[in-house]
Image (tube, rainbow, N blue to C red):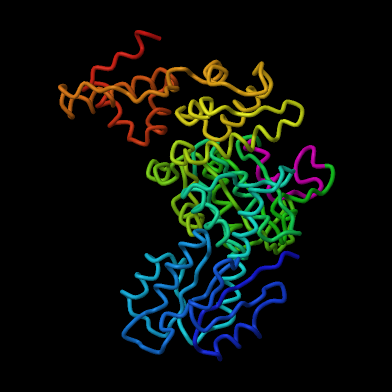
Amino acid sequence: MNSFTLLAIDDDDLILQTLRIGLPTHWRLAAFNNAASVPQNGVFSAAMVDMHLTGNTSRAEGLDAIRMLKERMPYLEIIAMSGDLDRDLMEDCIRAGASRYIAKPLNIEEVLLILDKIEALLLMQAATFNHPDKRPVWVGNSQASQDVKRQIALLRGEPGPILLEGESGTGKEVAAQLIHNNEPGRPFIAVNVSAIPENLFESELFGHVRGAFTGADQNKIGLAEAAHNGDLFLDEIESLSLPLQVKLLRFLESGEVRRIGGKEVIRTSTRVIVATNRNLEKMAQEKLFREDLLWRLSSKKILLPPLRERKDDVADLTKWFLSLERFHKKELSDDALRAMINYAWPGNVRELKRVCEQLALTSPLPVIRSEDVVKIVQPKFVSDAKPEFDFSMGLEKMLVDFETNVIFQALKKYNDVDEVSRKLRISRSSLYKKIKDFKIDWRSNT
C-alpha cells in the first residue's frame, strides 16, 4: 500500500495527539507547533494548518503559513482549521491556497474522509507520470485538468448516480474508469446506450427469465444486476428513449431489479455513471429527456472541458500518446509542438490521439517536424503567426464577420441546422435568425 505524510501545524498538542492516534496506518504525521519549524526540504502529501498559532485571535498567523507552503509546494492540498468560523477568515484561507476549511474541535471521521479523497487525488496525479500501462490516466496538469482530477477524487466513496458531460472526445469514459478506480476491486461494466436496439435495452439492463419472450431460452442476468457492488457506465445516455428513461429512473430511485417475465424483486447496490455529449437541460426543455431523470442524475456532475480550453495539456498529451507507440519511437520538435498547440482540435483528445498515432507511423525522421503535423491536421487551423486584424472596420463589424464565418464553417461541416445549433449551443430559432440577418448562403456552395 502507498504511504503518505500529513503535515500538521498547530500549537495545540491535544489536536496533534488526536491526529497521531486517529490517522490510518499508511499515513505518517509530521507535527510542528509553528510554521518556522517546518523543514524547507520537507515533502508532504497534505497539510493541516491552524489559523491562530499563538492564541492571538486578532491575527491569523496560519494564513502566512498557507502562503509559505503554497509557494514551496504549489500542488499541496492544504486544510485550514480553526474554531473561528468568521466568513471573511474562511474566504481568506481559500484565497491563500487552502482547498478547504474545517471547524475545531476536530471530528476525526471528517478528517479521515477528507484524507481519503486527497489520497485518491494523489494517486491519480501520480499515475500521470508513471510509464504507460493499461490503467486509465488523466494526462495533463493545466488548471482545468487539476479541477477535473479534484472532482473525480471527491467522488470516492460517494453513492448515487454521476453525470459526465462534455463534447465528443473529451475523455468521458476515462473519467468514468478513474471514478471507478478510486475504489478498486469492484465490478465495472461499460455499455454504449446507442449501440443497443431499443427493443433489447430493457432485457440488457434488467435481464429476463426463460420463456419471457421468443428466443429467451434461458435466464439472463442484466447489466444492472451484474454490476452489483460496483459501477455501471452508460455512455450516450441521451439516446435512451422516453419510456426507457422512466424505467432507468425507477431503478435509480429504488435500486430494485425485476427481470422481464419474472416476479422476484432483486435488490442491488449499483452506482450508475452516465455520460453525454448533448445539453440535457436543453433536451429536457424540448421534452426529449425527462426532467425528473435529469435532476436525479445532476446531483453529482462533472463537466469535462474541451481540449481548446486546456491547451496547456497538449504537450503532455502528445508526449504521452507518442510514448504508447512502442515500435515507432518519435520525438516532437519545438516547431511541431507549436503547430499542435495552435491547432483547434475540434475532435478533442480523441483526435489528438489519432494524430499522434499517424505521426508516429508516417513521419520520415526520428524527430517530428511542423510540416509533418500540417500534412495531417487541417492547415487552416495551424499557424505560428498571430492573426492580423483590420481595426478600421470597428469592433462591431469585426465581431459580425467573425460570427458569420464561424456559422458558415459549421453549416458547411455538419450540413444540418439542428446539429449546428447543438454544437454552437444556441437555439434553433436564434441560428435561423443569424443566417437570415448575416445573409449566410451556405447551401449554394455545397
Examine the rendered structure and indicate whether residue 378 appears above or below residue 54. above
Q: Residue 71 placed where, x, y %?
A: 46, 62
Foreground: 431 or 363? Answer: 363
Which corner quadrant of the image does residue 14 belong to? bottom right
Specify whether residue 199 is painted magenta.
yes
Examine the rendered structure and indicate whether residue 437 appears above or below residue 320. above
Instruction: Give the residues drawn in magenta, as a range.
Output: 197-216
Q: Residue at x 58, y 46 (%)?
A: 244
Which corner quadrant of the image does residue 38 belong to? bottom right
Residue 44 appears in the rendering: no
Q: Residue 271 placed where, x, y %?
A: 63, 58
Q: Residue at x 68, y 39 (%)?
A: 200
Foreground: 150 or 246? Answer: 150
Q: Residue at x 40, y 9 (%)?
A: 446
Examine the rendered structure and indicate whether residue 242 appears above or below residue 424. below
Outermost residue on the right side: it is 218
Disc count in the image? 0
